[in-house]
Amino acid sequence: MDRLPSLFISHGSPMTALQPGPVGDRLGALGAGLPRPRAIVVASAHWLARQPLVGGHPLPPTVHDFGGFPQALFDLQYPAAGDPALAEEVAGRIAAAGLPVAVDPQRGLDHGVWVPLRLLQPLADVPVVPVSVQPMLGPQHQFALGRALAPLRGQGVLLIGSGSITHNLHDVGRYDEGKVAPYVRPFITWVEQCLMADDTEALFDYRRQAPHAARAHPTEEHLLPLYFAMGAAGGSRLGAQRIDAGIDAGMLAMDIYRFDGGAPE
């Protein structure tokens, strides 16, 4: 079986589901070019917990975890099945890595999962298992979580971190059409340079080293899924490829990363 890459996806606003724009084109092309996975595991910035949790619902509901949007958005469903057996395997691998973990049999698919998957896998015919993010434990923890699951890539499982390469909602509505917040491009350039150089140590220390880190991410939860995807690359070589999907609302950079590094068995 071909080894799948791991992915980091900037999922953007929930409105991406109705107005996909460039990220829709990029995710559609990416999904069409990948072998069909047997299952998808997604670490989402919209499932936050003190310890790793794994969704074990056999038919996870589509969760509309937002407000103030058009009814058409609330009418959308992503009816992918879950995979309770895979959820138990994921939990077992996390536990074997020395991390506390539990399976949540009721968890549905939040918009950090179903919005990008509607574009990447529009038929919703691949089982999906969500995984939580631990916002208080930092990049190295999330990297270790991804590393624990890296061997699954060789078993037909697509591992995805879903967040945003920049995410400062304090700046919503501050930038006119065509205008970009001054911190966005320096930050995404620094991240790309570090990823291409496999400089994980600098990325772990991004809060101190990256330009405008606190402006790009006043809180960390939307960047942490990047480290999950990096860890899932396995080994010391990330094999990173940046896919530019534009900048939404002048402050949400929609970068996608594909990691083809070798995963340990």
Image (cartoon, rainbow, N blue to C red):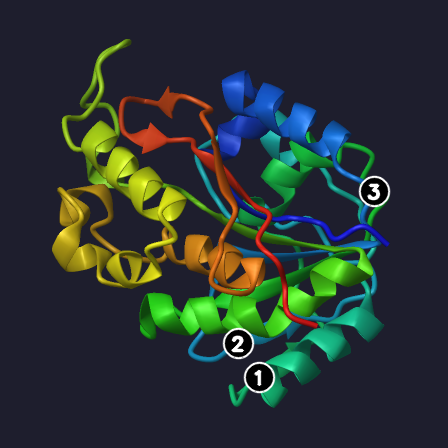
Q: Nearer the viewer, residue 79 or 51?
A: 51
Q: How far is the residue under mark 2 from the one under mark 3?
A: 27 Å
Residue topped by disc 1: 101
Residue 57 found in image quarter: bottom right
Q: Amino acid at mark 2?
A: Pro
- Marks 2,1: beta carbons within 8 A: yes
Where does the image place residue 236, in percent across and percent down from the top left? Answer: 47, 63
Residue 139 vertical position relative to residue 243 in the rendered view, above or below: below
Q: Earlier in the sequence, mark 2 or mark 1?
A: 2
Residue 12 visible in image: no
Q: How many marks?
A: 3
Left or right for 19, reference 79: left
Tell me the quarter of the image containing the N terminus.
bottom right
Which label is found at residue 52? Answer: 2
Identify whether 167 is placed above or below 57: above
Measure the alpha-carbon separation of dots 3 and 1.
Answer: 28 Å
Q: Which mark is residue 36?
A: 3
Residue 248 rendering spot, x and y as whole percentages: 37, 23
At horizontal 29% and vertical 36% (from top left) the residue drawn is 188
- Position in image of residue 204 (x %, y %): 29, 63
Q: Which element type, helix, strand or loop, lies under badge 2?
A: loop
With 138 as the anchor, is 126 left or right in this view? Answer: right
Q: Is residue 154 left or right of residue 20?
A: right
Give amino acid for label 1: Val
Q: Which one is in front in this view, the residue at disc 2 or the one at disc 3?
A: 3
Mark pair 2, 1: CA separation: 5 Å
Depth check, front residue: 40 or 135:
40
For numbered disc 1, what is the local secondary structure?
A: loop
